[in-house]
C-alpha cells in the first residue's frame, strides 16, 4: 500500500507555499496550479496544471485515490483584476468545485475559511458563534461555508471549513511590517490581542487534519491563547510606534481552540510570540 495522497487546490498561494516548505511526513501532496510557475515555489513537487472552474473533470481525476482535498484557492483581498466583491465570489465557486470533485473521487474536503467570518466581535469565539463578517472577504468565506456545507450534504461528501486565525508572517502585522509601523494602544498600555498560529505550526496542523478520517463541519485553527501584537513585533525585532486606540477598537479577539485541541492534542502548543517570530524568520526568505 502506497503513501496516502492529498490534493492541495491553490498550492501557489501563501499557505500552499508554506506546505511545500514544511512538507508533511507520510502524506503525498498533489499540488494544483492554474498555470506553470516561475520558480517561486519549491521545485520537485507533484504539480498538476489545471483550471478547476473551467475543467472540473480534470480536478475530479486529480482527486481520484486521494484521502482528502484541501481547498486553499481563492483571491486575496485587494488583488486581481476586480479587486473587490466580484473577485471574492471565486471563493464560493472554487469551494463548490472542490466539493463536487470530492463527490466524484470519494474523498473528504477541507476548505480554508477564515476568522474573518466572525467580523469584529470581541471575546472568545467558538465555532457556534454568530457569523458577522465585516468585509467582502469575510462575507464570501461565510457564504462559501454555507453553500459548500449544503452541497456536501446533498452529495454525501464530508466537508470541514477551517476558520484560520492570523498566521504570524502571513498577516498584516508581522508580515505587513514596514518602517514607521504604528499599533493601537489601549488605556492600560496594551496593544490589540488576537489569535495567532505560527507558520510551521500551521503546516503541521493542516497535515494532521488531512490525515484525520473524521472532522467536524467547522473548526477554528489557531494556537491556544491570544497574542499581543506588540509582543509579536518585539520578538521579531521590528520597531513600531503607538497611537491611542480609536473608539470602538476591540482589545481582544480570540478563537476558542478547544475543538482543535481535542482532535490534535499533541500537535498544538500555547501561542508564544518568540516561537512564532522564529518560525517566520526561518521561512521569510522564501516569501520575498
Image (cartoon, helix red, strand yellow):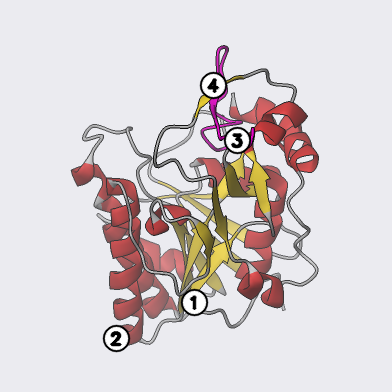
Task: Say which residue appears at 73% left-offset and 41% top-offset.
Answer: 276
Quadrant showing the C terminus: top right
Nearer the camera: disc 3 or disc 1: 3
User: Splitting the image into 4 quarters, where does residue 267 fall?
Assistant: bottom right
**Badge 2: how crowded within 10 Å, few (<14), some, or many (20+)?**
few
Kindly identify which residue carries mark 4. Answer: 182
CA separation in Å, label 3 and label 2: 45 Å
CA separation in Å, label 4 and label 3: 10 Å
Quadrant showing the N terminus: bottom right
Q: Is 98 placed left or right of 140 in the picture?
A: right
Foreground residue, 255 or 99?
255
First in sequence: mark 3 or mark 1?
Answer: 1
Q: Position of residue 43 (x, y in %)?
A: 63, 37
Residue 57 in view of the camera: no
Kindly identify which residue carries mark 2. Answer: 154
Kindly identify which residue carries mark 3. Answer: 191
Q: Position of residue 6 (x, y in %)?
A: 57, 65
First in sequence: mark 4 or mark 1?
Answer: 1
- What range of the chain is rendered magenta? 170-191
Cβ atoms under marks 4 and 3 closer than 8 Å: no
**Badge 3: how crowded within 10 Å, few (<14), some, or many (20+)?**
many
Nearer the camera: disc 4 or disc 1: 4
Q: Is residue 178 magenta?
A: yes
First in sequence: mark 4 or mark 3?
Answer: 4
**Residue 108 - label:** 1
Cβ atoms under marks 1 and 2 closer than 8 Å: no
Amino acid at each position: 500500500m502506497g503513501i496516502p495522497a492529498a490534493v492541495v487546490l491553490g498550492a501557489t498561494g501563501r499557505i500552499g507555499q508554506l506546505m511545500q516548505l514544511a512538507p508533511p511526513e507520510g502524506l503525498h501532496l498533489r499540488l494544483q496550479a492554474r498555470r506553470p510557475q516561475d520558480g517561486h515555489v519549491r521545485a520537485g513537487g507533484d504539480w498538476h496544471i489545471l483550471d478547476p472552474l473551467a475543467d472540473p473533470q480534470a480536478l475530479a481525476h486529480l482527486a481520484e485515490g486521494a484521502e482528502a482535498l484541501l481547498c486553499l484557492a481563492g483571491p486575496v483581498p485587494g488583488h486581481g483584476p476586480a479587486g473587490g466583491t466580484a473577485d471574492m465570489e471565486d471563493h464560493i465557486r472554487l469551494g463548490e468545485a472542490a466539493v463536487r470533485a470530492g463527490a466524484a473521487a470519494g474523498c473528504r474536503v477541507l476548505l480554508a475559511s477564515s476568522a474573518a467570518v466572525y467580523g469584529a466581535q470581541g471575546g472568545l469565539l467558538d465555532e457556534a458563534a454568530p457569523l458577522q463578517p465585516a468585509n467582502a472577504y469575510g462575507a464570501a468565506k461565510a457564504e462559501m461555508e454555507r453553500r459548500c456545507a449544503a452541497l456536501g450534504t446533498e452529495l454525501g461528501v464530508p466537508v470541514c471549513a477551517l476558520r484560520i486565525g492570523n498566521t504570524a508572517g502571513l498577516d498584516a502585522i508581522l508580515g505587513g511590517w514596514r518602517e514607521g509601523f504604528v499599533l493601537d494602544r489601549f488605556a492600560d498600555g496594551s496593544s490589540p490581542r488576537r489569535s495567532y498560529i505560527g507558520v510551521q505550526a500551521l503546516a503541521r496542523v493542516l497535515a494532521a487534519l488531512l490525515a484525520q478520517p473524521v472532522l467536524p463541519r467547522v473548526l477554528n485553527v489557531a494556537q491556544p491563547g491570544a497574542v499581543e501584537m506588540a509582543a509579536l513585533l518585539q520578538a521579531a525585532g521590528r520597531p513600531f510606534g503607538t497611537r491611542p486606540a480609536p473608539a470602538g477598537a476591540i482589545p481582544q479577539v480570540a478563537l476558542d481552540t478547544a475543538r482543535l485541541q481535542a482532535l490534535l492534542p499533541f500537535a498544538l502548543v500555547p501561542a508564544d510570540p518568540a516561537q512564532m517570530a522564529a518560525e517566520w524568520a526561518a521561512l521569510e526568505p522564501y516569501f520575498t
